[in-house]
Amino acid sequence: MSRDFDVIVVGSGPGGSTAADVLTAAGKSVVVFERGRNRLIDLDNPSELLYEFSNDEIKFWSRHFLGPDPWLEPRTFRLREEDGPRTHVGEVNNLPATVGGGGVHADGKLPRFREDDFRMLSELGPVEGASLADWPLDYDELEPCYAEAERLVGVAGEAGANPFAAWRSGPYPMPPGAPMYCAVLTTAAAERLGYHPYPAPTGCNSVPYDGRPACNNCGFCGYFGCPIHAKGDPVASLRRALMTGKAALRPDAFVSRILVENGRATGVEWIDLDGERHIETADSVVLAAGAMETPRLLLLSGFDHPMIGRNLMFHFQTLTFGQLPVRVHAHKGRSVTHAHDDHIVVTSGARAAAAEAGLPFIKGGLVEHGGAAHPTLEAKFYPWGPTHKEMMRASPMRDHLVGFTMQGEDLPQPTNRVDLDPDVRDVHGFPVARVTYHPHRHELVASAFYAPKLEAILREAGAVWARSTTSPDVSGPAMDGRRKMGSVPASRHVVGTCRMGSDPATSVCDEWGRLHSTPNVVVCDSSPFPTGAGYGPTLTLVALAIRNARALAG
Amino acid sequence: MTTGGTETALPPAAYTPALMARYFDERSYAVVRAACARLIPTDQDPGAEEAGVVDYIDGLLGAFASDPPLIWAGGPFSGRFGGAPGFATFHRLTPAEELAWRTRIEGSLGIPERERLGPVVGLQERYQAGISALGDDFCDVGPEEQDERLRRHDSFTSLLLEHACEGMYGAPEYGGNRDLVGWRYIDYLGDVQPRGYSDEEVSQP
């Protein structure tokens, strides 16, 4: 069969872009499909970048500039199967649909996982109701890919600053950037209470790197594309891939089906902007559409492994806020400059709290030190009338709020899943991804254990008040059978829906991301993660994409 | 380590009144303008009135009176802190994006491709209904009565407040925040690229 490319890559986010980079470097020809628009790279001259991102709250917060438009490409949600077909239609974990994918919107915190995270079942499990599993590879095997991922993306950090970090073979490619004033205050307080905050490893250039400028602290970071390309979004890997001349990028191209003959993928069917269907053939298909869209595409294509879409994990976020008397101007700087890992480590206190709740352990997650930022969002929280102006001047939210987001580890449960919604269709006419998700009791117990500790840090920092909430919101009516929108998790960290393992009965793909059923389909996103750890998934999925793509290249 | 600049104040901006409404008729324009003035009032500092918040809302409801429509302002810089001004050049939409935004603004109007997820009541219809509910005489009654009517029609007022906040504190290229009055009174510089903030501005009190 004639074909134009060796490999089709579905998705141009951190996973797909990395795979394209590795494959083209190994001499393969690659075409990358992206359902969203290209706002990143001049396709006629890939050494040039596009400059369409801006410091614009309306464009990014209110009007879905990075996509997907929740009306064109909705998802649906329910807490449990017994809630009926769905309780919500629209935005569910809308990571950007744009060239660069989730890498574009992130503020670029790029931590590695710890050694223990790769053997959760044997170290800590089992847990009733959860499907804990060890990874089919360990940290030591992945470490060289982590180091390479940090160099490729460009990560700023300080080796040795986090006493709980996994071992590393070398320093970070860049030193940390300027600490935000709010983090100066909260890290000092955390240290006084015996914790170990450190400069968060961040994919924001602290110095010029890889032909892109240093970050200038504009403050429009998380949820915004970087106007000057100082962020470690997939622009670096995509640009390298395109400049080899062996890669093509097709934006505005929705892949609707993987074509399979006799247990081998032969190509994909895709749909262009005008709704026309096309076929592209290749020797292999790399799936990097994200942990929501990758299982959806497999299901749309007729793959029938019963584990596809199962064990969906978010991070169970504990959000702790406090108000400081001083102005902290958190709109200046990267969204988050510091973190601490003390609440990931299973301490004797955590074990005691777990035992009391009848659990073998509890784990929290990475704690991000941050503040609020932008006035349009702030203003919408205040009442109207004269009070509005007084509050905007005093700015208890935007300019005095400091807080923590704990990215709490979410245990895998087979009942938490992505499947095809039986009724709701996207603009192309295909069933959308439906999310069924309810946190495990572990997450609730861990959050309840750590929230007071986080509040205590804020009080130590001088907060006049401190309180906590969670996402998904599990307080009050949301959990008693009367569902609210608040039960849709806000976390953009989503993993686990095509579990990797050695047993084809209990896993969808092998340790190289190859589907057991169809080994020339290789998953290069966060779908294969057997467990989610308490860290953002991006650097780990990039490291896995390096490993998997290199194995595919042979 | 970084290259932030040194200016510390917003540059002056020209006063540019809207020449004509894109969507509202005269009466609707007056009612929305008066209602916004109650939501974000003028006190010792300018409010929705001076910011031209009604023009932001008119720009959203009448986005498709322009080509490209006033949905996404351009980039990467406004020119307020250097660089060539790009915000005023709005992005073109794909056919699907136009479908989504027309549906959102105009409603589904019985058009099958706009009713894939069921009928959609557009922003224009919600505003027409809200303006009618506030009453023909809204501009003529006293402020207490105006506030009472806004409280009584709470769901419309919530929508109005959301848009009023965007028009007060969003980028002026969308029609509101005239002369940057929304940013000045809260001591906020807005879009600071390509100047950014210096490391000292980030890390010091």
Image: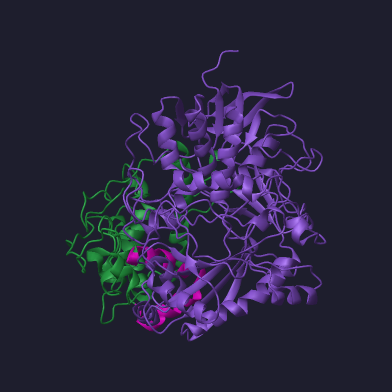
Residue B61 is situated, as x and y percent measured from the top left of the image, at 39, 54
Q: Measured along the vertical axis of the image, is residue A2 above or below residue A425?
A: above
Which residue sits furthest front?
Answer: A169
Where, quadrant-wise, is the N terminus of chain B in this rendering?
bottom left
Q: Is residue B128 magenta?
A: no
Q: What secondary structure is the stretch in magenta mostly built from?
A: helix
Quadrant position of residue A285: top right
Report the front residue among B188 and A422: B188
Can residue A313 be seen here? The reply is no
Q: Colour of chain A?
A: purple
Q: Measured along the vertical axis of the image, is residue A376 above or below residue A552?
A: below
Where, quadrant-wise, is the C terminus of chain B in this rendering?
bottom left
* Total numbered labels: 0
Residue A12 is situated, as x and y percent measured from the top left of the image, at 50, 38
Which residue sits furthest top?
Answer: A1
Q: Measured along the vertical axis of the image, is residue B65 above or below residue A8?
A: below
Q: Magenta region: which residues?
A: B141-169
Quadrant position of residue B189: bottom left
Q: Residue at x 35, y 74 (%)?
A: B40
A295 sits to left or right of A17? right
Identify the colour scheme used: by chain
Residue A283 is situated, as x and y percent measured from the top left of the image, at 61, 22
Q: Residue at x 60, y 55 (%)?
A: A113
Q: Colour of chain B?
A: green
Q: Measured along the vertical axis of the image, is residue A520 above or below residue A489?
A: above
Report the front residue among A168 and B73: A168
Report the front residue among A397 and A321: A321
